Amino acid sequence: MTRPSLLALCLLAACSPRAGTKKPETADTPVAAGAKAPVAGFRQADAPAQGEAAPVLLAMRAEIARAQAALATTESAKPYYFSYRVTEADTVEIVASRGSLDLSTRDRGRVLDLELRVGDPSFDNYHWRHRPSPGMAGTRSAGLWGQDLPIDDDASAITAALWLATDTAFKQATAQYEHAKTQQQLAAKTDDDAPDFSQEKPVRSLEAPSSLEIDSALWEDRVRRLSKAFERHPQVLASEVRLVASAGTRYFVSNQGSEIQSGQRHTRLILSATAKADDGMDLAHVDIVDVRDASELPDDAALAARVDALATQLEALRTAPVAEPFTGPAVLEGRAAAVYFHEVFGHRVEGHRQEDESEGQTFADKVGATVMPAFIDVFDDPTIGSIDGVFLNGHYRHDDEGVTARRSNLIDGGKLVGFLMSRTPTKGFASSNGHGRAQPGADVVARQGNLIVAPREGLTKAALDEALLRSIREQGKPYGLRFVEINGGLTNTSRYMAQAFQVNPVVVFRVYADGHEELVRGVTLEGTPLSSLSKIVAAGDRFETFNGFCGAESGFIPVSAASPALLLSQIEVARAPAAQDRPPLLPPPPATAGGAR
Amino acid sequence: MIATLLCLALHGAPAVTAAATAAGPESDVILDAMKDELARAAQLKLANTPAPYWASYQVVDVEAVLVSAKFGALVNSSASRSRALAPRLRVGDLQLDAVGVPISDEPLVGYEADYDALRHALWRYTDGAYKMAATQYRREVAQKAQTTADPDRPSSFTTAPPVISIAKPLPANVDRKALEALARRVSAVFREHDHILDNAVSLSFSAVERRFVSTDGAAVLDGSAIIAMTIDASTQATDGDMIGRRKTHLFRPGELPDAAVLEADATQIAKDLLALRTAPLVRDYSGPLLFEPEAAGDLFASVMSTQLVASGNWNGEVDGKFGQLVLPKGVDVVDDPIATQFEGKPLLGTLGVDDEGVQAERVQLIRDGKLVGLLAGRAPGKKVKRSNGHGRSAPYGMDVRPGTTNLIISAKTGLSAAAMEKKLLALVRERGAEFGIIISGADSHGGVTAYRLDKDGKRELVRVGYLQGLEFRQLREVVALGKTRVVRHGMQMGGQPMPVGAMPPTMAGFVSPMSVVAPAILLRDAELHAFVGDNPKPPAYPRPTFSKR
């Protein structure tokens, strides 16, 4: 078996590019600088309708009881914990490019993830999962993930599949437990005495199952027409419009008495396009809208305008000058700041990383220490459903270990006060705060949900811009930078590699000392987390929200991050790697009237 | 549904109408877009590199439905449509060239009849293909300048008469609900058998529309539809050994077997598995092996289709055997893309035009035991220098390779089943061994069904391991062939045989059926080995009881 990925990789995607804006609007902001807390319309998600236990849940309940009784009498080590997590999803995916459908599918599936622990909470078969194993490697993971279950509500067929998976997981877990005990004999004493599994109160919550109501034919037509709007932009090479609408129900049952049935719905519309600059640089741009139901998406005219804005900005990027390596002041606008925090900070406060000796443990021994300026608070709160009316992708009510999601304070007045916790305890943090998350088919680790950067004081847009100009003059720089859109990045948290992050900004302007701005392309933002966080000198007063899907050890999960704009006294940018191949040799084929002849 | 699909199947039969246009629409938007964009390929030019001297587009449209069930309940059901583009560009000349087969970073292209969208996609793919071919060509020219020429080196490519064959298939529809019901019904058989741990019954329908144009002037449009069915089940032997069995079916949509027949297959698997739980294990075996016709068909398909090829035959093993005896005298092997049936049973490998726009021809591979022919696409070999229309394309930027269509093996002096067993026993005695082995079915995923035949003629079901990989040269070990021949169906992609089963939609358009007509064969010497390792314990607690339906 391989060790879990040491690289926390994030592929996120931003919203709402602002095509060709030289200077974002400042109309309704007062000119005077004010030091007051940013205003935010945080809204808790509505309480869902309660429902009856579905046939799948009944089958899970019955089989877990049967397994518990049967395995209590075995001669080998007995399981003390079982959980079944079944994720049921009904997903419509429609993709079109240049007015023609590429894909239109509807898939229904049920996936089982099973966790089975042998031993006791202080030491079990998962013991070496986040610790460097002495002696032989190969026992870092346990459990059984990603088993397909019948989608028919046939109790017999479902229990037969649960039975086979439980038996397989049980044999695997007992073997791992014996192996873990052998390794314990070899292990040197450390000051790490955290138990392997936290004690949590059982949760019982039965919501009504979710169902997908969408007219595929109607959306095929809308997606097709929308994709045709890219035809108006001859410099766009590949382009597509992708709609992914899904509704699903997550069922969770444990032998500790938890029973959760939780419905969820999500719709995502992705507009994306690529182009190539004359020097061969590949350019890609994306605009994403996340909502609960497809019916909440903007109307055709508004979406077509977003396609135009995206393509126009991509065309502007083609001819924009290439960024030079630079060190100096910069403003990260709200969404860019949110992605920056997600990468630079969020991945490093995932609880299990503090336990794993192979991790950089940037913050492991920093609890109570000042790690960023005193005017900043940071927390992660999955219970928030929207901010200023913007849907949050990272909202959930119960995590993937059946623990109720709660707000987790991470930074209080610049001091580190907590971690994102799953049921894997770490020194000083014995309990989960409902951040154990995984994609169906993967093992759970602590992950982000809605990461919120909440400065205690914020400047108006005008005041923040003025502060940037002042900083440029004071440092004697020819210009500073404004980061508007960051489409993703990656963070290395392993200690075997440099403790660095890199994010890939797409829309960046040079801000000259006289206030005029110029779009540049090929920017890569680099740095090291602790020094970078200490360079934050001011914040804006309006929250912006970023919705994305974040990939790490436990797969891709929906996340959100929100932040006001941030002014950093110093950032470092490098030149993005250049592509070698030339733009297409022939001009694009001439478009005929109508296309579909 | 049956009627429509039957029509499609008939239409899918070869349209061998060279230089003629069969009944079809006056113009086909997709073909028009392909031809119009292909016409621009000659304008591609980089400094110091010639324009392509030959180019082709293959566009493959697939409509796929995949359903699977276990224990009577549906596990998956999905339907999709997709289009794959396979452009090929050649830079240089027939003697020495480089081919550009781009691997796209955008796997999806529009599947609708949209002229503009398709031309735009072809334009992007073609640009990538030319840059790839140009880079490779410059590298080959530079290398050639540094080496002495091999006089035996086959040229890179050959000419072939262009085929124009347009036979637009009728739209294919399959009743997805009927397939779901069938998968549920057949898998429900396993509810009645307590020893079955797991099972899966899957049905995979794919209807393919294939279009091809080349700068030679070839233009092809045809289609076919097929359903691949697999029935899998597993149990655990009393000694802990995990045992699986698989039965596959491949059929045209109008020729769906009766549900009761398929249920009987499932029941047979359940019975075989019950018997195998306590059947003796033959761990390592070296000696004579008798392959009953179905198993022999699988063996011929895997050994011959990958090795009796002219193009891309790098090791020269086959070239060296040309004109020599490779099977017993009296044995003939042909690959026949024209045949449509054998003794009233359909052959599924039938092909009109190959994936390089060349008319598929009947090829005599072995005559009276001697190797006399090879399967060839347009890349020639040392012995066979022209295409016989067997070039098959594959996805993901892989080049064309020759593949089999309907492989037909016949022996002038075939023995009866009883005579074959007698001959097996003679070999056993000759060797001083206790028993011989009969392989009766050899589905690659389900393990081998085998019997031991004792010196005294007693036949007993045994568990055996896997067959030590057989090479073409081992066909010299064939000492007898049977009289009765059966038709065995398989699938191939890019000339490589593959197990019958579901394919991801992006690959399905490149997968096509093939058939083998084979008699039983007796090998003087072969080996079987079992995997060595500890077996898992039996289940810690019993399978839940099934409710009555």
Image (tube, coloured by chain):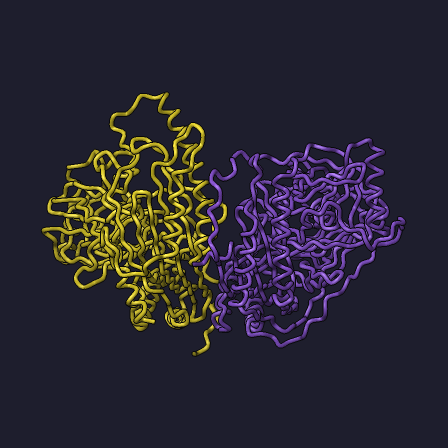
Chain colours: A purple, B yellow
Residue B311 is situated, as x and y percent measured from the top left of the image, at 28, 39
Residue A278 is situated, as x and y percent measured from the top left of the image, at 56, 36
Residue B206 is situated, as x and y percent measured from the top left of the image, at 37, 60
**Residue B285 visible:** no
**Residue A443 visible:** yes
Location of residue B244 with respect to A486 vertically, above or below? below
**Which one is in front, A159 or B528?**
A159
Q: Residue at x 74, y 47 (%)?
A: A337
Residue B520 is situated, as x and y percent measured from the top left of the image, at 19, 54
Would you identify the image quadrant in which residue A483 lies? top right
Q: Residue at x 55, y 67 (%)?
A: A67
Q: Where does the C terminus of chain B fall, quadrant-wise? A: bottom left
**Which one is in front, B258 or B227?**
B227
Residue at far front of view: A593
Residue at far bottom of view: B549
**Which one is in front, A140 or B105?**
B105
Location of residue A428 with respect to A325 vertically, above or below? below
